[in-house]
Image (tube, coloured by chain):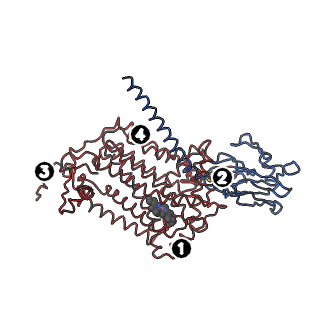
Amino acid sequence: MQNEQVEEGRRDFIYLATGAVAAAGVASVTWPLVAQMGKAADTRAAGSIEIDLAGIAEGSQLKMLWRGKPVFVRHRTPEEIAEAENADVSRYPDPQTDTERLVPTPSGEVNPKYLVMIGVCTHFGCVPVGEQGDYGGWYCPCHGSHYDTSGRIRKGPAPTNLAIPPYEYISDTVIRVG
Amino acid sequence: MSGHASTYEPKYAAGRWLDKRLPIVRMGADFMTYPSPRNLNYWYTFGGILTLCLVAQIITGVILAMHYVPHIDYAFESVQRIRRDVPFGWLLQPMHAVGASMFFFAVYIHMFRGLYYGSYKAPREMIWILGCMIYLVMMATAFLGYTLPWGQMSFWGATVITGFFGAVPVVGESLQQWLLGGFSVNNATLNRFFALHYLLPFVIAAFVGLHVWALHHAGQNNPVGIEPKTKKDTLSFHPYYTVKDGFAVVLFLLIFAFFIFYQPDALGHSDNYIQADPLKTPTHIVPEWYFLPFYAILRAVPDKLMGILLMLGAIAVLFVLPWLDTSRVRSMRFRPVARMFFFIFIFACFILGLCGAKSPDDMAFTVGERVVNGESRLIGLNFVWLSRIGTFLYFSYFLILPILGLIEKPTERPDSITKSVLGDKHPKPAVSG
Ligand code: HEM
Ligand code: FES
């Protein structure tokens, strides 16, 4: 009798241990099957781009592809800058001052003339059109999101402001994105 | 597969030999003699039509894959080459592209049929749920396929739809980039979409097998929604329904052929004749017509995540419908109130489809004009609000059904299927003068 109970305990143990090893095996085989779909090394390494700001005329915008996404560099007019700086952002869906959306130049000050953003609507990723919409900034035609002259969301389904890519000034007029 | 007593008798020795070892001929024979309710109408021919659609998509698809190049630099051109240079490509490519639309047209009628005749109710819940699974996988397949020609709508449709995954809290962005295999829709995305587009139709075929198995196990529903009681209530599938289905298939193919030969692009979008450009979004993105109602629901809500959840909910609610409809009466023929709501539901689907095709801020109706701060504005209903009304009507159907089953008084139902066909007359046709 006693012997049989011991046997059963042993069997349960072997059963559980086998199951655990099998589960770990299945998991370790599944992981590569899932992970292969992630970004490949060459995609992740897709380097940085340099942009010369001097070539962009006032009131115009440069579009460049970075990591397959458009980057907008807008040379803003004084009116656009004034509008962006004087806005009362406290009631905006995603409150950010204009300065918070800029990066210091080598002198330590920001240059409000040049606004650098990822030109991807934060709703579902369309490319907004410049100088359009109710706030003179950008308008996304896909589902009607309106951004102001600082790329902040004002109206429509997009939840956040247009994103700022990681970038730095390598001289007063050249930036490196990425 | 079929539950009825087998009547197959192999005539030859070889047939008997095989029947003992692999009764596959018997399976086919039993399928063909399956007793089906004698009152099935033309709405019941769409199952057969759908099978034809699936086979046609797989055949034309495998052929297209022989000429198609899944690379962002060549995909667009390779599809144009199929249409212009490949022998009979002008026929085969539209067969596949139009075929997808015809497939959805048929599946929608098939589903509305199920809703009207209560085919989702016990004991047929599994048939219905498997059908919903098929519908889901079909939507995925069609979406993936639409990306392949790599036109502007392909690219931006793929961007918007994969953007849905980015809305998932916390892990959204990683999930989206995992799906795309990059930071945005890129070559890796096109490659994997092609692989999956090739795979999923076979998954559909497997689900169709289960769907038909469940159908033959639980038995077919019929327009009066009462079970066959005697042998007289049923007819052998062949020749009665093979012929009826065949006739419907011919009519269906006429419409199909009209589009292939005269209007191959009518159901598509002209922007897809422009090669994908990641720097420029078309001014007006619309999905294929068969997704429009869901697109309208998505846009009816100002919040991104809520919009997605509501859109998914519109599909998810179909899965639980068998438990939402509390009425014991299946067919809407005998449910005057529910029938009215059914037609409102269909109406809502069309309204949503319309809203999905229009710009949200455009006006659906105007009743007048008003001057505000020197600017004149139209007064009326814009498409956002119309889609809100449509969304409300869509979901209210599923909220009303549980209550309606408890309070509605159904009209009188016939005693049997035979009586519903022949009236109270003696089953032999009465001699008339
Ligand atoms: C459930 C069945 C299927 C559906 C609903 C479907 C749907 C679609 C759609 C909507 C397109 C885009 C057509 C266009 O706009 O030009 C497409 C393209 C394509 N499909 Fe399918 N498909 C199915 C099955 C298959 C199968 C089984 C294969 C191959 C094994 C296949 C291979 C292709 C290829 C190579 C293309 C790109 C060429 C083109 O655009 O015409 N499809 N599919
Ligand atoms: S993607 Fe821009 S509003 Fe939807």
**Quarter occupied by the C terminus of chain A:** bottom right
Left or right: residue B212 versus residue B34 is right
Residue B377 visible to an observer of this rendering: no
Kindly report the distance in space between the C-alpha atoms of the residues bearing marks 1 and 4: 52 Å
Decide which of tag 1 and tag 4 comes sooner along the chain.
1
Secondary structure state at the residue bearing disc 3: loop
Q: What residue would you read off at disc 1? A: B81
Chain with red colouring: B
Disc 3 versus disc 1: nearer the observer: 1
Q: What residue would you read off at disc 3? A: B426
Q: Kindly identify the residue that appears in the image at 65 percent across and 51 percent down.
A: A145
Q: Position of residue A170 (x, y in %)?
A: 84, 55
Q: Amino acid at mark 3?
A: His
Q: Position of residue B392 (x, y in %)?
A: 49, 44
Disc 1 versus disc 2: nearer the observer: 1
Decide which of tag 3 and tag 1 comes sooner along the chain.
1
B245 up-or-down from B300: above or below: below
Colour used to depict chain A in the structure image: blue
Mark 4 chain: B
Q: Are marks 3 and 4 in contact (CB under 8 Å)?
A: no
Q: Count how many numbered circles sit on residues in the image.
A: 4
B416 up-or-down from B283: above or below: above
Q: Is mark 2 within 8 Å of ligand 2?
A: yes
Secondary structure state at the residue bearing disc 1: helix
**Quarter occupied by the N terminus of chain A:** top left
Q: Residue furthest right?
A: A107
> Which dot marks residue B400?
4
Kindly report the distance in space between the C-alpha atoms of the residues bearing marks 3 and 4: 40 Å
